[in-house]
Image (tube, rainbow, N blue to C red):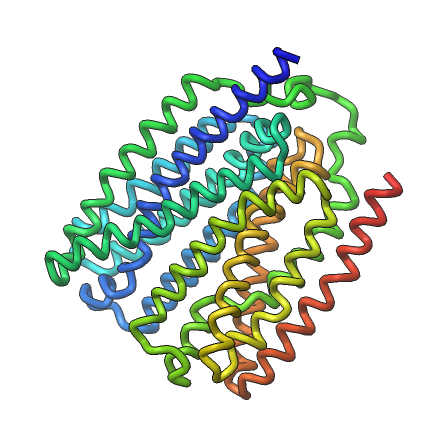
Amino acid sequence: MPSVRRDQRVAMRFIFLMGLVSLLADMTYEGGHSITGPFLSILGAGPAAIGLVSGLGEFVGYALRLLSGYLADRTRQYWPMTILGYGLNLVAVPLLGLVGRWEVAAGLVVAERLGKALRTPARDVMLSYATRRVGTGWGFGLHELMDQIGAVTGPLLVASVLYFRAAAYRAAFLTLLAPAGAALAVLLLSRALYPDPRGLEPEAATDGDNRAERRVPTVLWFYLLFTGFSIAGYAHFQLVSYHFKVQAVVPEAQIPLLFALAMGVDALVALPVGRLFDRRGLATLVLLPLFTLPVPFLVFSSSYALVLPGVVLWGAAMGVQETVMRAALAEIVPPERRGLAYGLFNAVYGLSWFLGSTALGVAYGLGAPYVMLLAGALEVLSLPFLYLLSSSLRRE
């Protein structure tokens, strides 16, 4: 028993260190994201160029995770991929403060997303090893909580710079060099303390040669289909905020505050929903469509009183996505295939959100009720695949 508690403490320290890296990293790139659009316009980029750059960055950030996840499984070079990814991810943001052309800035925006694509599957695999010691839901929930603290404080740091120095975008980007450097320092410390995170999960420390174990489980495909339909029906906040503005449902100055509220709910939901996952298992996934289904009927309404609970549910759904959906992969996929599994998951997630957001945007052009109908239908369509996932796991 003492050895079990010692192993759990070791795993918790690793999760905390990686959570601290994510907190500092999110301060950096979420702080940068909050002003990238206006900064590109100052450099001469038009709205079409800004839309292209942001869309390309998100596509690269998700689609290439499939390749990086596959490479993580093949090479098992988790730390080199994580360090290289974070390095590219974090250095690109402060460098924006030094560029003078929007084309160069656009390259840095895409490079930042490329770094995130490179490091995310490898990092999540290492986290999965540690979370198996303390509960996958609790471990990923703690990581998401710390991650969201950074996502809130980064934009606040940037806002404070702009408050004291109006339009000082270059100074704001350069200020982000501090959390970026701290994130890399903690990351290198984590590498020194935990050179082989596979040892945190006994099953991962042994290299099995069984081909059946190395095959991607069939249940993963049901899981990915559930993910695809559920995420496609999850409206992007850009579309939600557009509705708030053009319909004058929410005062313009309050829109970023509502986004901050959603991020705060995400952080608050992470730990309890993670603990619930450890107790109830994959049945907790039903929370995702339950939280998401009412969202379009609330946030796309014309009532301020309905918008507020809709934003809260939007943030709660994000908390489930970032906690339970990552934890579930650690439960249903063997250690030696998790890199590919996380890569597949992120690729499906990104593609589904892109296609779903596009379809919901087209539907919004026809009228808000069409958005409600389409989003609701997509969430309902995800439920059969959740049932098939649960049935397959019971049979296995």
Residue drawn at x 41%, y 76% is: 242
- Say above or below: 333 vs 299: above
- Say above or below: 146 vs 381: above
Res. 344 in view: no
348 with respect to 150 (left or right): right
- Judged from this view, the residue extending furthest toward the front is 305
- Say above or below: 175 vs 132: below
- Judged from this view, the residue extending furthest toward the right is 395
Residue drawn at x 48%, y 82% is: 303
Give coordinates of residue 289: x percent, y percent: 66, 62
Asked whether 364 or 12 is in front, the reply is: 12
282 with respect to 171 (left or right): right
- Judged from this view, the residue extending furthest toward the left is 165
Residue drawn at x 62%, y 25% is: 133
- Say above or below: 187 vs 56: above
Give coordinates of residue 180: x percent, y percent: 29, 38
45 with respect to 315 (left or right): left
Residue drawn at x 50%, y 59% is: 315
Asked whether 191 or 207 is in front, the reply is: 191
Figure quadrant of the C terminus: top right
Q: What is the quadrant of residue 343 in the picture?
A: top right
Give coordinates of residue 4: x percent, y percent: 63, 16
Give coordinates of residue 92: x percent, y percent: 29, 45
